[in-house]
Image: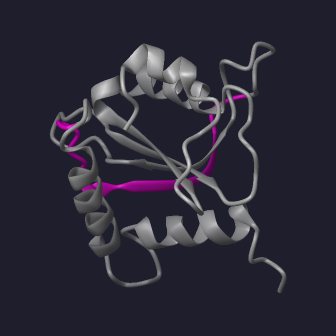
Amino acid sequence: MHVENDEVRTHSAMLAALMNPKGTHSCGTAFLKLLCQQLHDLVRDSICANFVFDPTHAIVNIEKSIGGISGDKEEGGRMDILIESGNVQGDKTKAIIIENKIYASDQTKQLYRYYQFAEQKYGLENSLILYLTLDGHSPHDIGSVEKRRGKFP
């Protein structure tokens, strides 16, 4: 099939399908709950320590457009995976944004654009951006996010 390196149609689609509580896997929130547990352990000693995501009413979007990329590259783009908590009982909607990098290079200010979007739509305390790579390397273009948020988890 020659799709082993296709981020959008293979890796992101597979991850989104597993995280989707309404997915065809018939496991409900099981996979998303496992992700949330791992995230809790990952961020417990960081500035994101209070981030709690309720997977019960989660909505999973793949290749979510946040508008055209602006000339200065500080707005817009397409998020690989956006998982929103769903607004239940007056709680503010929370989001997990996943940028999936298999063999693609970083886009100019890509994570900064996602950070700006998350800050405006959810508030920093209600959002988490994950950068997934094959080898766990850090993004190349993270400086502007680190300056605004402190240490990036």
Rendered-image quadrant of the N terminus: bottom right
Q: Toward the viewer: 57 or 102?
A: 102
> Which residue lies at the image location 19% right of the left edge and 35% below the top edge?
91
Q: Is residue 25 magenta?
A: no
> Which residue lies at the image location 52% right of the left edge and 67% below the top edge?
15
Residue 29 falls in image quadrant: bottom left
Rendered-image quadrant of the C terminus: top left
Q: Please give left or right for residue 143 compared with residue 35 in the image.
A: right
Q: Is residue 11 above or below residue 110?
A: below
Q: Is residue 51 magenta?
A: yes
Residue 122 falls in image quadrant: top left
Residue 50's spot in the image, x, y percent?
Answer: 17, 36
Q: Toward the viewer: 73 or 151?
A: 151
Residue 126's spot in the image, x, y percent?
Answer: 30, 33
From which residue to which does the magenta span run?
49-67
Q: Toward the viewer: 90 or 84?
A: 84
> Which residue lies at the image location 52% right of the left edge and 55% below the top edge?
136
Residue 98's spot in the image, x, y percent?
Answer: 51, 49
Q: Please give left or right for residue 123 compared with residue 66 in the image.
A: left
Residue 63's spot in the image, x, y percent?
Answer: 65, 50
> Which residue lies at the image location 31% right of the left edge and 37% below the top edge?
93
Q: Toward the viewer: 55 or 114?
A: 114
